[in-house]
Structures are given as structure tokens and as C-alpha cells.
Amino acid sequence: MNRTIARRTALAAIFAAPVAASSFLSAPAVAASVSVIVNGQPVSFDQPPVERAGRVFVPLRGVFERLGASVVYANGTINATGNGRNISLHIGQTQATVNGQPQYLDVAPFLIGSRTLVPLRFVAQALGAAVDWNNNTSTVTITGGGSSNNAPPPNRSFYLSNQKPEPNGSTGTQSPAIHATFSEPVQQNTLHISIDGRDVTNDVYSNANGFDVTPSFQLPSGSHRVHVTGTTQAGNSFSTGWSFNTGGSSASNFIRGISPAPDSRVGGNFNLSGRTQPGSTVKIVANGQATAFGVFQVGTGAYQTTVQADSNGVFSTAITLNNISGSQVRVLIQSIAPDGSSVEKSYTFSM
């Protein structure tokens, strides 16, 4: 009995004041008795939670993605975006950034085998979630963070996350950029997307882990439904989707004057230019791999860049693609103006 009380008291300290540096453990201790619940859904980890220097660490994707954030990990740097926040952490470093502002951790993220472990409380709070520790049940309860729409539905192994526009949310533009991430890899040639029952598969940019599409038609004011069907790489069929609303007012930003002219022929190397609102941030993705079934797949050979429009609104970039002559090149351009208004357009060229 005394041993049980001592264990719970020690775990309670994990979510209290920081432990002095002198208590840093040279080897991580598995906190196997800790349960984690995110927005009402229990989280299972292939690598159990670990206690180090008075903090609980968990595998990064298990928490970030449940809290509605997308994660990119490379060369020891963890970059996460979600719920209007940008977070950056580094393996072995106690300095992190949240929306560009420096933050400091008591203990740095670390690796166990191939798993990257991050401090649970810091990650949750950085994404705007509330964290509660129940000492009686050794349970961490996390609420908020925008993940209620991203947690997997009960009894379903496949689900969508990081949806844009957000489920049941609203957008001011009538041609919104639509995005979702898959909970497991899919067979791309089985993927079909429709908006309000209208098939937009031919306009989709996809890979095995998610898709992007901007409808070529304007959506009227009101509610709209995105429907996603296909088959996972494990062979399981899925049919899912979400709804969002448009307010009927177009974004104030614009993209025009694209050169070369859309639908013209280009080479493997060409300069792309256009005009938008002065000072806008312009994101450009180009790829020339069209596949059967009309799904446009963004692969490793895709060109991606971000440029800044000058004081006259002019932007340009040199695009290099390794594509076979006769293939189709599709370019997706998103412009985000200083006032926050955005617009996204897709253009097609041939090689």
C-alpha cells in the first residue's frame, strides 16, 4: 500500500513544479501506469510513456496528431503546425519556439530507438490544450487544442485529420483550399473526392498520406460536404468526409497575369511569374506526374517553394522538373496577403 501511494505521489510531481537539474535521470524510466486521454479518447502508444527528470515524455505523433497538428521531422528538428500555432523543438536542446517566440523546456526531447519522445505537458499547452492530472488514477486528461475533429471515431481504424476548412467551420472564400491527412496510407489510384456530390478527383493533388484540392468552381453561401472514398494500402475500404460552411464573400486577395500562359507548352526548366497583392507570401507547388484515374500525385520530384511578392505585387520563381515529354504539369499557387486574405489557384501546362 505504501509503495502504491509513493508511486502516485511521484507521478503527481511530474505535472507540478519542475524537478531540479540534479535529479536528471541518466536512463529513462518507463511510466507504464500513466494513461493519456485526449478529448475523451484514450491514446495507445507503441512506445510507452517515459518519465525523465520529473516530466512525462510520449512519442511525438501520438499527441501532436491527436491535437490536430501536422508534424514534419528531419535532422533532429520537429516542426508542428496546428490550431493556428507553429511549434519547433530540437532533439537534445531545451530551447523551443512557439509562433516564433523562444520557449524553454526543463528536459530536451530525446530518442529511444526509432521513436522521438517529447514532453507531454509542453506539447499540449503549446497547442492551446488544457492538461489535467488525476493522481488517484494516474491519468493525464488533455482537452482542447482543436483535436475534437481529429480524434479517431470509435471502432474505426481509418479517419481523416487536419481537415481544412475545419469540420463545421466557416471560410470567407467561395473557392477554398481543401485538405485532409489520412490516418494510414491509401492506394492513390483508388482515391475519389467529391464536393456536394460533384466529383473533383481530377483536380486533386495527393500522396499516400493526404490530399489537397481547390474546386475549379465557386461554392455558394451555405453548408458543403466533402466526401472521400478509397482503399487503404492494407486493403480496407473507407468512406468518410466532413462538412464546412462558406459565407459567400470572396477573399480580397487575387492571382492574375500568370506567365507562361496557362495551358501552354513548357520545358523541364521554366520561369513562372504573376501578380498578387503587394507583399503577399506566395506558396508554389509544381508536379508533372499525372496518373491513371486522373489523380494528380505529388511525389518526391515535385517542386515546392515560397516567395514574396514585391511592392508591385509581382512574384516569380524558376521551376525545374524531371518529367517525361508529353506529360502534364500542374502548378498550385496560394497567395496570403499581409491582411490575412488568401486565394489559391491551379494551372495546367504541358511538356
Image (cartoon, rainbow, N blue to C red):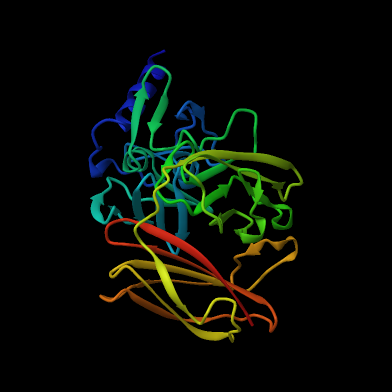
Rendered residue at 70%/41% (across/down): 238
User: Depth check: 39 or 338 in front?
Assistant: 338
Can you see residue 302? no
Can you see residue 99? yes
User: Depth check: 300 or 339 in front?
Assistant: 339
In the image: residue 228, left or right of residue 110: right
Quadrant of the drawing holding the C terminus: bottom right
Rendered residue at 54%/86% (across/down): 269
In the image: residue 113, left or right of residue 337: right
Q: Position of residue 310 (x, y in %)?
A: 29, 76
Q: Position of residue 205 (x, y in %)?
A: 59, 61
In the image: residue 102, left or right of residue 198: left
Q: Position of residue 346 (x, y in %)?
A: 53, 66
Kindly give the residue lying farthest to the top in the view shown: 1
Q: Quadrant of residue 154?
A: top right
User: Depth check: 286 or 183 in front?
Assistant: 286
Q: Quadrant of residue 78?
A: bottom left
Rendered residue at 24%/43% (across/down): 22
Counting labels gives 0
Q: Position of residue 164 (x, y in %)?
A: 48, 47
Residue 166 vs 101, above or below: the answer is above
Rendered residue at 34%/58% (across/down): 252
User: Depth check: 261 or 322 in front?
Assistant: 261
Quadrant of the drawing holding the N terminus: top left
Residue 110 vs 256, above or below: the answer is above
